[in-house]
Image: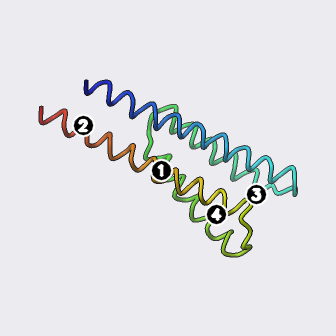
C-alpha cells in the first residue's frame, strides 16, 4: 500500500512539473515572438529545462525552488507594470505550483516517515 502511495505522489509531482515546464517555456517563446525579448526566451526555456530535469529525475524540491524563483520574478514584474497578463497569470500559476510541489514534498516525507515506523 505504501508503495502505491509513493508512486502516486511521484506521478503527481512529475506531471505537475512537466506541465509547468510547458507553460513556462511557451511563455518565454511567446514573449520573444511578440516583443523580441531574448530575456523572456532565455528565462522561459531555462526555467522550463530545469523543470523538465526535476520531473525526469523525480527531484521535486528543484521544481519547488524554480517555482519560488518564478513567483518572485513575476511578483516584481506585476508590481512594476500592474499588468495581469502575463505577469499576474504567471504569478498565480507559479504560486499554485509552489503549493502543489510543497504538498508533494510533504507527502513524500510523511510516507517515508510512516514506512520506517511500521
The residue that label 4 is drawn on is: 74
Mark 1 or 3 closer to N-term?
3
Describe the element under mark 1 as helix, strand or loop.
helix
Q: Is residue 53 left or right of residue 9?
A: right
Above/below status of 35 relative to 49: below
Q: In this view, does 58 lie to the left or right of 32?
A: left
The residue that label 3 is drawn on is: 39
**C-beta proximity under 8 Å, tags 2 and 4:** no
**C-beta proximity under 8 Å, tags 1 and 3:** no
Residue 91 rendering spot, x and y as whole percentages: 61, 60
Mark 2 vs mark 4, CA separation in Å: 34 Å
Q: Which residue is drawn at 82% across and 57% down?
A: 37
Mark 2 or 4 closer to N-term?
4
Q: Residue at x 62, y 48 (%)?
A: 47
Describe the element under mark 4 as helix, strand or loop.
helix
Q: Which residue is drawn at 54% across and 52% down?
A: 66
Above/below status of 96 relative to 60: below
Numbered badge on residue 112:
2
Query: Quadrant location of the C terminus?
Result: top left
- The picture quadrant where one finds residue 51 is top right
The residue that label 1 is drawn on is: 64
Mark toward the viewer: 1 or 3 = 1
Residue 57 rendering spot, x and y as whole percentages: 47, 32
Mark 3 or 4 closer to N-term?
3
Mark 2 or 1 closer to N-term?
1
Q: Dot 1: few (<14), some (14–19), or many (≥20) neighbours within 10 Å? A: many
Amino acid at each position: 500500500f505504501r508503495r502505491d502511495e509513493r508512486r502516486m505522489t511521484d506521478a503527481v509531482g512529475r506531471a505537475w512539473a512537466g506541465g509547468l515546464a510547458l507553460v513556462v517555456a511557451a511563455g518565454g517563446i511567446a514573449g520573444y515572438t511578440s516583443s523580441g525579448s531574448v530575456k523572456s526566451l532565455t528565462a522561459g526555456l531555462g526555467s522550463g529545462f530545469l523543470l523538465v530535469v526535476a520531473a525526469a529525475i523525480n527531484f521535486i524540491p528543484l521544481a519547488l525552488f524554480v517555482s519560488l524563483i518564478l513567483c518572485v520574478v513575476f511578483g516584481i514584474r506585476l508590481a512594476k507594470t500592474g499588468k495581469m497578463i502575463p505577469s499576474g497569470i504567471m504569478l498565480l500559476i507559479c504560486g499554485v505550483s509552489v503549493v502543489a510541489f510543497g504538498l508533494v514534498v510533504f507527502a513524500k516525507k510523511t510516507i517515508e516517515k510512516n514506512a520506517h515506523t511500521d
